[in-house]
Every structure is written in C-alpha cells, then in structure tokens.
C-alpha cells in the first residue's frame, strides 16, 4: 500500500484543535447535568471540579509529551501498543471506538428529543437521522471541513458560557436586576457552609465531574492531522486545560453566587434558571438551541474520532485492512462509513430496546473513558523508562512530577471507578466492564496481526 493511500493530511490548525477538544468536553453535562451535581454536593462541587481538573492536568501533560515524541493518528492507542504491549493497544483502541459510538448514539437521541421542543408534531427519529446524515457527509470531506464545523459548534458554547459569566458578575458586583439584592459570592458558604454534605458529598460527585471532562483527550486523536504538531500540540494541550477549568469552575461560581445553590432545581438547567431570573428573553429557547449544538458537536467528534481510531487499529493489524485506506480527500472513509452505520442502528434500536438494556451498553462508555486516561499515564511512565534506557528519544514537552504523578492519577481513577458502585445507575458499569474486556480478549486471541506499513 502506498504512502499516499495511508497518509493523513496535516490540515488542522491550533484554533481547530483547541476547539475540537473544547467542543468534545464542554457539553450537555455542564448545561444540564450540573443541576443534579449542584443538588448533590452544593458549593463543594467546585472542589470536585478542582480535584478532577488537577488529574486532567497531569493526564493532558502526559499525553502532550507522548504526542510531541511521536504525533500519530490513534495516539494513546498507539502509545499503549508501543509501551504497554499489543493487547493494551488493542483494548484501548476498540474501547475508545465503542465509547464514542455509544456516546454519539445518545447524542443523536438527545437531538431528536430537543428539536421536538419547537416541532412536537415530527417523529423523534427524523431530526436524529437528519443530523447523522449531515455530519456523516461533512466528515467524508477534507479534515479542514470537520475542523471548521467543530470550531463554530464550540464557539456557540463558549459565547453562551462567557455571556453567563459576564452577566452574572455584573449582577454580583453591581447588584443590578431582580437578583442583585441577594447575589453575592458569600452564597458559596452561607447556605449550610461550603461543604453542606461533608466530604462524602464531594466524593459522590467525582464520577459526574470526571465524565464531564471526558473528550478532552480528543487532542490526541487529532495528532496525525495537526499542522506543525511539535508547536501546535503542546500549545493546544496547555491552552485547553486552562480554558476548561476557567469555564467549568467560573460558570459554577457565578451560578451559585447569583442564586444560592439550595434554590436551584435539580431538574432544571441552572443556565435556564439564571437567565430567566435575569429576564433574558427566550432563555429556555436559547439554552435548548445550545444543548442541540452541544449534542451535534459531540456526535461530530464521535464520527471523527471513531474513523481515526479504526484507521490506527488497521495499521497495526488489529482491525480489517480496509480501514487503513484513505479516500481521495485523505480521510479514513471506511471507518467513518462503519461507525455511522453502527450509530444509525443504535439510534434506531434506542426506541425499541428497554431502557435498562440501553444503560448496560452505555455504561461501557464510562469505563472506556477511565481506561483511556489510565493507559495514558501508564504508557507515559513506561515511555520515560524507555527514554532512560536510551531506546527512544526524549520529547521536548515534559509532564512534571513523573513518575509519582502517574501513580497518583491512576490511584485517583481507581477511586472514581470504585465510586460507580454507590449509584445504581452507574453500578452496572462494574458488571458490564469484565464482559466487554473478555470479549476483546477473545477477539484479540483470534487475530493474526499483519501491520500495514505507512510512511512517517
């Protein structure tokens, strides 16, 4: 197979990569899911985001170091293969593919539900199908088209969060509007204290917080198509960490400063609640549009990442060789075809399969995220050992605190995994995960890897 058939185009710029990762991370979890998290932990939710953000900081710095060592498509799956063994690479690649397929399925369903806010007479499957066809078509074009789409999707979310933060600060500082009389940063500690449910409240929200951060590792999937990767990837890695922490923590500080946390409803988006209290016209409509944009953005990222992951697996002989071929537009079209087909089947089955069964499937996605982050830290630790032994070159962009930070983050991820057992809605993940890994073990044992050679 020639290099031209297997070489991705490096057409993603820094602004694309920054907002691809941002768009994959900032989504429905912040706009809708934060309501339940605030109800469960109160202002201490900020501590959960800070602790989780610290773990993400080290994960992304470790990934950034590996990316500057060798910027390739499939990144963390390729590093797992190189530094943890072929089976680890196989499990990581397929788990990440399945995680995004299932996530995109859920997002397509969300699109159908929220479009009916305006058009209740249309069937729920129609908007979901329309969104999938549109995104499928755009992903088959040059990667720059995907980058531009994701840039604008993410920008809508950024502007919404910035508007909330600026408007909330005006209410808190200048006491304007209906909420001005009671708005204050003191609301963060004057309604039952900063820890109204104690340390346990913080621990119980860790899994919600960490799943809200999922998608930040998308920077790694863009590595094979990043323009000037040695410069762009470290800059994007550092920038995305700061921005995500600023937007997540900044938005939550403002929300709980404007309205005391115990006055927010766990069933209503805090963004809708605050905007309506500020007398913003059509607040519910605006947030509904943003949520649809967030779901579309996530599905877009899902098609992008699944196609690239199948491409990387095929190059190592861990997926059918057809996935290693690129279209004339230099995109892994075969992987996108298959991923979109599976997403379509899953979206349709969602209407007929009982909800409990659907939860069993989606729970694998939760474990897939934690596995991916953990394998990044282990692969990074083994990479440093290889550097010390002189087997590979040292990257110019380095993660601080190794190897102690590696093990601390892995231990933290194990704690988050254990916390899944406390919630009946997520406990099923601990039952499904062993079955999933057993299936991967059977699949790997039946393979006879014949890697496809590709140019650097």
Image (cartoon, rainbow, N blue to C red):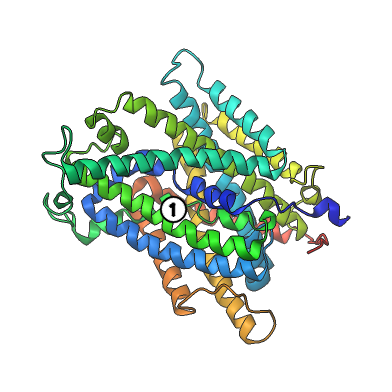
| Residue drawn at 36 percent across, 50 percent down | 248
Residue at the bottom extreme, as displayed = 389
In the displayed structure, does residue 140 sit left or right of residue 304?
right
Residue holding disc 1 = 213
Q: Is residue 227 visible?
A: yes
Query: Left or right: where does residue 244 sit relative to residue 7?
Result: left
- Secondary structure under tag 1 reads helix
Q: Nearer the viewer, residue 13 or 7?
A: 13
Q: Quadrant of the C terminus?
A: bottom right
Is residue 57 placed above or below 270 in the rendered structure? below
Q: Residue at x 62, y 48 (%)?
A: 305
- Residue 276 x/y as whole percent: 26, 29
Position above or below: 413 against 277: below
The foreground one among 273 and 52 is 273
- Residue 356 in the image: state x and y as whole percent: 44, 37
Asked if 263 appears above or below 374 in the picture, the reply is above
Residue 52 occupies which quadrant of the picture? bottom left
Nearer to us in this view, 432 or 50: 50
Q: Can see residue 39?
A: no
Category of crowding for the residue at label 1, using alpha-carbon neighbours closer than 10 angstroms: few (below 14), some (14–19), many (at least 20): many
Q: Position of residue 8 (x, y in %)?
A: 75, 52
Of the 4 image quadrants, the one containing the N terminus is bottom right
Residue 245, picture quadrant: bottom left
Q: Is residue 285 above or below residue 237?
A: above
Total of numbered circles in the picture? 1
Give percent across and percent down for residue 271.
31, 37
Check the image and name the residue furthest to the right. 2
């Amino acid at each position: 197979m020639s290099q031209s058939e297997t070489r991705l185009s490096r057409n993603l710029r820094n602004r694309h990569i920054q907002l691809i990762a941002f768009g994959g991370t900032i989504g429905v979890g912040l706009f809708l899911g934060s309501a339940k998290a605030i109800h469960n932990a109160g202002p201490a939710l900020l501590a959960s985001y800070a602790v989780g953000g610290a773990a993400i900081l080290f994960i992304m710095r470790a990934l950034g170091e590996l990316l500057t060592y060798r910027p390739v498509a499939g990144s963390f799956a390729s590093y797992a293969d190189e530094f943890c063994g072929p089976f680890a690479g196989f499990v990581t690649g397929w788990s990440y593919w399945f995680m995004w397929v299932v996530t995109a399925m859920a997002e397509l369903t969300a699109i159908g539900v929220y479009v009916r806010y305006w058009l209740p007479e249309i069937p729920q499957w129609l908007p979901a199908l329309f969104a999938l066809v549109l995104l499928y078509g755009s992903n088959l074009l040059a990667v720059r088209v995907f980058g531009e789409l994701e840039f604008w999707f993410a920008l809508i979310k950024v502007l919404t969060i910035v508007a909330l933060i600026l408007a909330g600060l005006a209410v808190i500082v200048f006491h304007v509007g209906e909420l001005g009389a009671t708005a204050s940063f003191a609301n963060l500690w004057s309604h039952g204290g900063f820890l109204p449910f104690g340390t346990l409240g913080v621990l119980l929200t860790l899994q919600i917080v960490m799943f809200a951060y999922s998608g930040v590792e998308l920077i790694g999937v863009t590595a094979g198509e990043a323009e000037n990767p040695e410069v762009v990837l470290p800059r994007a890695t550092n920038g995305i960490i700061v921005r995500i922490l600023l937007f997540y923590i900044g938005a939550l500080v403002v929300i709980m400063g404007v309205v005391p946390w115990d006055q927010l409803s766990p069933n209503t988006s805090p963004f809708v609640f605050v905007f309506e209290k500020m007398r913003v016209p059509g607040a519910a409509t605006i947030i509904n549009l943003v949520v649809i944009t967030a779901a579309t953005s996530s599905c877009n990222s899902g098609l992008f990442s699944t196609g690239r992951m199948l491409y990387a697996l095929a190059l190592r002989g861990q997926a059918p060789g057809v996935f290693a071929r690129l279209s004339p537009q230099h995109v892994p079209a075969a992987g996108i075809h298959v991923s979109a087909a599976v997403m379509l089947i899953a979206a349709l089955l969602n209407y007929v399969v009982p909800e409990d069964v659907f939860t069993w499937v989606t729970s694998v996605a939760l474990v897939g995220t934690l596995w991916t982050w953990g394998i990044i830290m282990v692969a990074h630790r083994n990479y440093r050992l290889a550097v010390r032994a002189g087997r590979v070159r040292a990257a110019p962009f380095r993660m601080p605190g190794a190897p102690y930070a590696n093990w601390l983050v892995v231990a933290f991820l194990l704690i988050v995994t254990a916390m899944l057992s406390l919630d009946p809605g997520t406990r099923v993940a601990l039952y499904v995960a062993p079955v999933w890994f057993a299936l991967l073990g059977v699949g790997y044992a039946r393979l006879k890897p014949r890697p496809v050679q590709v140019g650097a």
